[in-house]
Amino acid sequence: MVLSGRSWYHQQSLLKNQVVVLVANFENPQDDQWGVTKDIIHQLEEALEEYDNVEVQALNEEITAQEGIKVARAKGKKHHADIVLWGWYQDTDSHAKVTVKFEVLEELHYLPSVQTKPLIQTIAKLESFEIQTQLSEEMSYLTLFTIGLVRYEAKDYEGAIARFTKALEFVLDAEQAIVQNNTIDALYFYRGVAYYYKGEQDKAITDFNQVLKIHPEYAEVYSNRGCAYSEKGELDQAIADYTQALKFYPEYAPAYYNRGIAYSDKGEQDKVIADYTQALKFYPEYAPAYYNRGIAYSDKGEQDKVIADYNQALKINPGFTPAYINRGNAYFDKGESDKAIADFTQALKINSEYALAYNNRGNTYSDKGESDKAIADFTQALKINSEYALAYNNRGNAYSDKGELEKAITDFTQALKIYPEDALAYNNRGVAYSDKR
């Protein structure tokens, strides 16, 4: 299945061991009196103290509004920082207006746009530290959220979940927040995906539900929730979610692809083929869709269509070894043994430890009457996977074809030790015992 939130490629960024958060002095002659910078640093240190790979540094100088982002980024790089916090505030006799900037120096693929709006409060609130507290909590939230995304990109899903969950402790009333709500939505979104990859589907569904309360037409979230339901075996609910995603985003290829998987699990092959075809209409370079549609055609016995789909998958991805295996199987079913052997051999050139390729090539050699080559391939498969019951059974058949019945019986017996429910192995061993008389 394909989840939105995990790119179809992986981008390295900001994945070093230590993350440095640099906090500049807030621009105001009375900063020492109001203590905004000091309070932000203190709150950040407390929020991040359990994470030994994060360091909070004070810049001990201002970055003015006139200097702007360019200077903030330059000073951040000079101090080897990953995140720079800076801002300014002006006050009159009655009000203070605070502007805060949150700058991530390196590109994070999944980080949404972080925008803030000015915070205007009475001087009385500033004197009572309400502004400092609000700023500190929101900066702690943003920092933890960003570091959670760092762990997410590194595929450390447990670490990401811990930081996202900690960040939520600092979320204030949405109407009072100076941080745009898209970061809160994104937090639930990516925590849900992280729960999915950890196998905690109920928690994933809860987080996706949270996003959908805010954005009830968010197609990608319906598709993701469908994946979680599918993992739980709740296929009808999964299909309903994929269908809902496609109502809001009719060209969303992953939802067609995922719904195709769900229909496949239900054995509805015509619907499977229709959905993979639709996915390929919108994303014609997605090799797995050709591969999976090929499986559906194979289940229907349409081998020419199977081969056509695997041809296409291999044009897109020549190293896609399962496509060679399945195309080889289709050639075998059509009686084109030499083409089948060529495909299994190509799979083994790419992955010499592919036991299935040895097994299937061995079957093809057996079908051609080349028992010695078949036995060599089955033996190689068993070197790779000593618990491969099918390879024992197949090698037993090859030994039977050569008249080496003791060896055949030994292999059938071994197959049954591994898989005692294999009726075919019992039958084959019975035939071998009979032939010994």
Image (tube, rainbow, N blue to C red):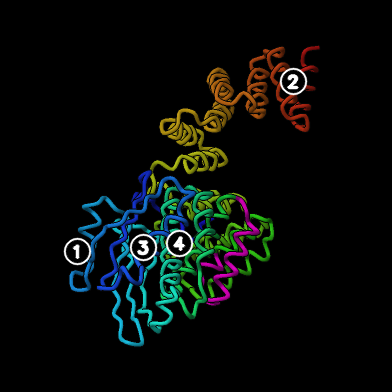
Q: Which of the two discs, 3 and 4, labels the residue nearer the N terminus?
A: 3
Mark 4 → mark 2, Cα distance in angstroms: 46 Å
Q: Main secondary structure of the magenta part?
A: helix
Residue under pointer 1? 71
At mark 2, the secondary structure is helix
At mark 4, the secondary structure is helix
At mark 3, the secondary structure is helix
For badge 3, the amino acid type reads Lys
Residue under pointer 2? 413
Residue 168 pos. (x, y %): 53, 64
Q: Quadrant of the C terminus?
A: top right
Q: In the image, which residues are magenta?
A: 199-223
Residue under pointer 4? 280
Residue under pointer 3? 38
Q: Which of the two discs, 1 and 4, labels the residue nearer the N terminus?
A: 1
Q: Could you classify mark 4 by the number of other residues whose Cα lies within 10 Å: few (under 14), some (14-19), or many (20 or more)? A: many
Q: Which of the two discs, 3 and 1, labels the residue nearer the N terminus?
A: 3
Mark 1 → mark 2, Cα distance in angstroms: 75 Å
Q: Is residue 200 part of the magenta span, yes or no?
A: yes
Mark 2 → mark 3, Cα distance in angstroms: 75 Å
Between tags 1 and 2, which lies in front? 1
Q: Could you classify mark 3 by the number of other residues whose Cα lies within 10 Å: few (under 14), some (14-19), or many (20 or more)? A: some
Residue 55 pos. (x, y %): 37, 50
- Compare residues 32 and 99 and report the one nearer the observer: 32
Q: Which of the two discs, 2 and 3, labels the residue nearer the N terminus?
A: 3
Q: Does the image show residue 370? A: no
